[in-house]
């Protein structure tokens, strides 16, 4: 077995990542309210020894017309109920540094890590959706730069809280009446620009020491942040070249801050259309694209590009002149990715929205199982990816076909595990368990 | 079967409610970190058809010396993992209005209600523990009066968010491409003294419409708040007379604001010591009291009375002259309850701390199964209680003996259900499902 193995997560979107997945004749949109549906997906992923399941999140309702209301259940709570019926698979929830309190967030993830016996991961986001601000008393959503400055401090506070009980603080000496060794339970006494938090946390250090830190922004600020704090990075790339450049850049930044880049898993999204022939796979994609409602897609595009393109001719060349390259959206990596597609492929507006409908800008390869496995192997062996966030276009069908048809090929090629070697998410990713910062200080 | 039935919750404290329960030879304190232990307690409570399990909470570490560090896992996350292995029992989590964001709290409880199919309850607290302030950037813990003013607005916002999707907002019309009827998904546009929240929530209305609202403060402000917002009240009383006065007062306040007092369940805590003879039950209590560490108890007492009594003679009469009757603690119902014990029973300091070690001021009856059942029936039939929060001195033993010995007597007397009639917590408590405020407005 080769040393380096693919990391594979299932990124769960209610009925699948294609924007119109819920409209597919096979979809059961009612199931997306039912925890049992998500538990079944997680159990299936676990039977196939995937590293983790993953939920995105934003503390606001994404609105793009009545057809596009995007339901988001609070993911830590949701994952706790999934943890209870699974044994090994990792559980990654997105949570916002801009719209949470660090003490509360540290507690939720610590509880998830405890109850799952070490399977929690935190996808650290600063929340890009400006609508969230109005749910938290802010007149204006902070700029990305300010959000990352706040996130930097937030992550410091949360890490300190997770470390505030040393691993051996809990004594439980009944006879001596010593419940915990209070010299190993530390106030963190954080005083910073954004937060003042005394601590300690009110629960012992969790099985992984700290839940795995995941990060998903790919802007300049996001890359800097990831290079310092992320243990896994979720990222969106349309081409091998773009993914390679990104991976090289991240690894260089990690080295520059003294980190071993091998301990930072780079996991692009992949939303594959798979069938026994390429034409059939293409037909599957087209079938979903025919269900796209352009005004819903244009609502999504407005959020990503900051401009309302409804009323434009869908079949004319993309109206590049309407884009505001100075707007706040233009700083996002997703904005740049979309403009890259426009410039590279000279698409019409309809072609663009169909492309984005697939997985909101993530890679959407179309092909046979061998073709998809070849692409995965190519990205993996070239160093463009350490693994993937698998984003099935439809659920559960799109996931089943990936597991049944593509995964066996990857296994035959020695690229993916047949059994779990460990039981924590850190172990799946090959990451070591961090010592408590306070233990280090007093050692 | 009589019309009126007891409501019974299991209030879970890691190894039991007696302060020294973890030191008992039979206790397994390690189990209190293990979700499986709590799941087993919940399953046992569910087999016996109890209404709910309940977790207290505070976003800070309660410290009273190294022996008294009180672990608190974040309870909504914890309960989600318990929900996954149970079917019918209610799930009540405490959460703070002073130290949470209403949008985040509304989401967590909505998720818990969805994933449990309608079994969530929110115990609304303003957080009495002053140490919490320092974990949330505050120099000073707000006064009880200010906290209740904030809570009033908080509860309004959370209720509006829970109602923001009307029950029939979700359409899921695949053919027509209508996911939800946006005219039935409402921005709440709340602007108040403490909060500005636009909404709507990002998930559909939950099975119970709103999770059951529970309240546990019994001060003047707390009673006013409860009379307006609570559907169940947890309260501490040492005597039938005190419980009766409280119940009458709450019902009068509820009537005064136009509520039917029968829809407000008054549930005092009960921490019973049960054995086949009264002497044996007394011996059980004494056995736990012998494990009490006075400096731990004095630490707890300092939090409740605002004065450090360490160094005082434990066997002299209680030093009443040291108490500050003008301090902020003196406004709490628990302060008054303790002073009542002192004045009524003329106790020594040691006798007081042993009394409080039982269940921090809750009712601690000692007797045979029939004696305990008689007391429960007396409180219930007299109207002093609609049921009880059962607080076993030790867990699981103290709960087992209650279920095995006392519950059958209550059932024989027709006071408690043999089977669940419904599947939601509202149904267990006999509470109706509220309509959405927005549906009422547009009807």
Image (cartoon, coloured by chain):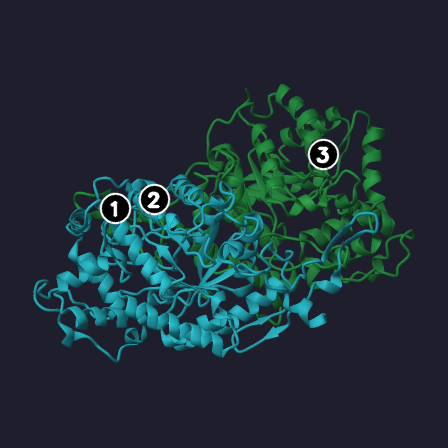
Chain colours: A green, B cyan
- What's the distance in space between the residues labelled 3 and 1, CA to CA? 50 Å
Q: Secondary structure at mark 3?
A: helix
Q: Earlier in the sequence, mark 2 or mark 1?
A: 1
User: Measuring 16% from the left and 68% from the top, which residue is drawn there?
Assistant: B345
Q: Secondary structure at mark 2?
A: helix
Q: Chain of mark 2?
A: B
Q: Are marks 2 and 1 in contact (CB under 8 Å)?
A: yes
* Quarter of the image where one finds residue A6: top right
Res B32 label: 2
Res A415 label: none
- Vertical placement of residue A233 versus B431, above or below: above
Q: Residues within 10 Å of mark 3 (few under 14, many from 20)?
A: some
Picture coordinates of residue B297, whole percent (x, y): 20, 59
Q: Nearer the viewer, residue B86 or B330?
A: B86
- Vertical placement of residue A409 versus A389, above or below: above
Q: Nearer the viewer, mark 3 or mark 1?
A: 1
Q: How many numbered marks have been drawn onto this rendered protein structure?
A: 3
Q: Are marks 3 and 2 in contact (CB under 8 Å)?
A: no
Picture coordinates of residue A423, whole percent (x, y): 46, 32
Q: Is residue B281 visible?
A: yes
Res B22 label: 1
Q: Nearer the viewer, mark 3 or mark 2?
A: 2
**Residue highlighted by disc 3:** A397
């Amino acid at each position: 077995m080769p040393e380096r193995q693919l990391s594979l997560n299932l990124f769960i979107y209610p009925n699948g990542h294609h924007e119109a997945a819920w409209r597919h004749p096979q979809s059961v949109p009612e199931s997306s309210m039912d925890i049992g549906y998500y538990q079944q997906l997680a159990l299936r992923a676990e039977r196939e020894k995937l590293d983790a399941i993953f939920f995105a999140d934003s503390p606001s309702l994404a609105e793009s017309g009545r057809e596009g209301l995007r339901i988001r259940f609070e993911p830590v709570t949701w994952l706790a109920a999934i943890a209870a019926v699974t044994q090994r698979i990792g559980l990654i929830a997105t949570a916002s540094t801009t719209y949470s309190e660090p003490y509360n967030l540290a507690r939720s993830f610590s509880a998830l890590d405890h109850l799952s016996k070490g399977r929690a991961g935190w996808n650290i986001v600063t929340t890009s959706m400006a609508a969230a601000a109005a749910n938290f008393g802010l007149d204006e959503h902070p700029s990305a730069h300010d959000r990352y400055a706040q996130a930097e401090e937030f992550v410091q506070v949360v890490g300190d809280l997770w470390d505030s009980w040393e691993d051996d603080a809990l004594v439980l000496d009944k006879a001596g009446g010593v419940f915990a060794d209070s010299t190993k339970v530390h106030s963190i006494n954080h005083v910073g620009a954004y937060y003042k938090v005394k601590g300690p946390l009110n629960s012992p250090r969790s099985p992984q020491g700290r839940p795995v830190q995941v990060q998903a922004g790919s802007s300049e600020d996001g890359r800097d942040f990831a290079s310092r704090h992320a243990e896994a990075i979720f990222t969106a790339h349309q081409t091998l070249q773009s993914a390679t450049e990104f991976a090289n850049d991240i690894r260089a930044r990690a080295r520059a801050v003294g980190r071993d880049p091998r301990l930072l898993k780079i996991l692009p999204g992949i939303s594959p259309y798979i069938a026994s022939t390429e034409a059939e796979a293409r037909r599957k994609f087209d079938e979903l694209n025919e269900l796209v409602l352009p005004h819903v897609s244009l609502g999504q595009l407005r959020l990503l590009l900051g401009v309302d393109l409804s009323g434009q001719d869908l079949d004319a060349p993309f109206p590049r002149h309407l884009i505001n390259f100075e707007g706040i959206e233009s700083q996002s990596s997703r904005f740049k990715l979309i403009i890259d597609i426009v410039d590279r492929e000279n698409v019409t507006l309809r072609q663009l929205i169909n492309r984005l409908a697939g997985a909101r800008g993530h890679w959407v390869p179309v092909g046979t199982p061998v073709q998809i496995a070849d692409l995965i192997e190519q990205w993996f062996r070239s160093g463009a990816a350490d693994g993937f966030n698998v984003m099935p276009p439809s659920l559960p069908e799109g996931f089943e076909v990936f597991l049944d048809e593509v995964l066996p090929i990857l296994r035959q090629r020695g690229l993916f595990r047949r059994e779990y070697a460990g039981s924590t998410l850190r172990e799946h990713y090959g990451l070591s368990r961090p010592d408590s910062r306070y233990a280090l200080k007093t050692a």
